[in-house]
Amino acid sequence: MWKNYIETISKNYYFTAPASNSEMTLVKEKLNVELPLNLIKLFNETNGAFDEHGYPLIWSTGQIVEDNLFFRGFEDYKDIYMPFDHLLFFSGAGNGDLFCFAILNENIQKDDIYVWNHEDDSRIEVASSLEDFVKGWITGEISV
């Protein structure tokens, strides 16, 4: 479903092998969050989606763990940004801004997608679902 969906919007993306159950479990364990169903479905098809230059539309499970742990633990950020533990970053805009789901009590409560602005620390809703985010980001309907 996800690979076909992305390919209907643009043929300029490539996909990797599906994420393993252990890779998805690692995200849950390291970040203390249940992955949203649509992200699980995507990872069951591919462990990330990448443009022709290798830039990720959707990060791999490994990058999700690495980048989320970095933002949650980097001491210098604690004085200038609100906490990040209630966000699950899964993609970047290429300018320092990051796309995320909101976490409440270890669960993603809504399908809404937010962008975190690295300059002013704002967190603004940009799409009502992962599908809308993918389409909007690829077509330019969503920009930051």
Image: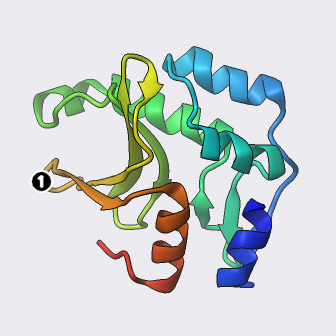
Q: Residue drawn at (43%, 67%), measured in percent from left and top?
A: 94
Q: Position of residue 26 (x, y in %)?
A: 67, 21
Residue 40 appearing in the image: yes
Q: Residues within 10 Å of mark 1 (few under 14, many from 20)?
A: few
Q: Residue drawn at (48%, 38%), measured in percent from left and top?
A: 67
Query: How many labels were placed on the picture?
Result: 1
Q: Position of residue 38 (x, y in %)?
A: 62, 46
- Single out the residue that lies furthest toward the right: 17
Q: Is residue 31 depicted above or below 122 in this figure?
A: above
Q: Position of residue 97 (x, y in %)?
A: 32, 58
Viewport quadrant of the C terminus: bottom left
Q: Which residue is mark 1?
A: 120
Q: For this view, does 92 lie left or right of residue 7?
A: left
Q: For this view, does 141 lie left or right of residue 133?
A: left
Helix, strand or loop under label 1: loop
Q: Residue drawn at (35%, 66%), measured in percent from left and top?
A: 95
Q: Position of residue 43 (x, y in %)?
A: 74, 45
Looking at numbered disc 1 in the image, what kind of residue is underneath it? Asp
The quarter of the displayed image where residue 30 is located: top right
Viewport quadrant of the N terminus: bottom right
The quarter of the displayed image where residue 34 is located: top right
Q: Residue drawn at (30%, 31%), measured in percent from left and top?
A: 84
